[in-house]
Amino acid sequence: RSAPPQARTDERRQNGVIKKDSGSQEDLSFQDLASIEKERRQLLLRSELPFWRILSYYRGTSLRAVVSDSLVWTTLLIYVWIRWRANTIDYVPAAVAMMEKTNVNILGGFLSFFLVLFVNQTNDRFLEM
């Protein structure tokens, strides 16, 4: 009897997710196929739920990657520290006073354009899968 697919680490799975093309010519066992099909059907049924219920799931979402990513937490801590520091000092630093005179509209327009292109490219990659 084989181990359950989520516990197996082989060339077909990467971090518990089935790869698109494993490159293996070996057939899956019936138990493996049944468990994969069960996971897929559960995911399909979840897509019919209201939006707030879909957001509450942890398994099968990107929430697990976000929670365990140290870069996300490091960025968040730096942001909180900067906000705390800005609210505790009594004077306005010279760099902030200089930024008041700059035109931020150009930067905002560029970042908006970049964001649209980035999202479009990401969606194209997703649809190719």
Image (cartoon, helix red, strand yellow):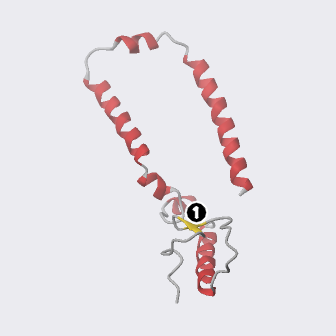
The extreme bottom residue here reads 1
Locate residue 103, reporting x and y percent: 55, 14
Q: Amino acid at mark 1?
A: Pro
As displayed, is residue 7 above or below residue 104? below
Residue shown at the point (52%, 63%) measured from the top left: 53
User: Where's the C terminus, which quadrant?
Assistant: bottom right
Image quadrant of residue 71?
Answer: top left
- Left or right: 56 in relation to 116: left
55 or 129: which is nearer to us?
A: 129
68 or 5: which is nearer to us?
A: 5
Q: Residues within 10 Å of mark 1 (few under 14, many from 20)?
A: few
- Left or right: 96 in relation to 35: left
Residue shown at the point (58%, 21%) measured from the top left: 107
The residue tagged 1 is 50
Residue shown at the point (70%, 42%) measured from the top left: 120
Image quadrant of residue 73?
Answer: top left
Mark 1: secondary structure: loop
Locate residue 24, reporting x and y percent: 67, 72
- In this rendering, the count of numbered labels is 1
Locate residue 113, reporting x and y percent: 67, 30
As displayed, is residue 37 above or below residue 129? below
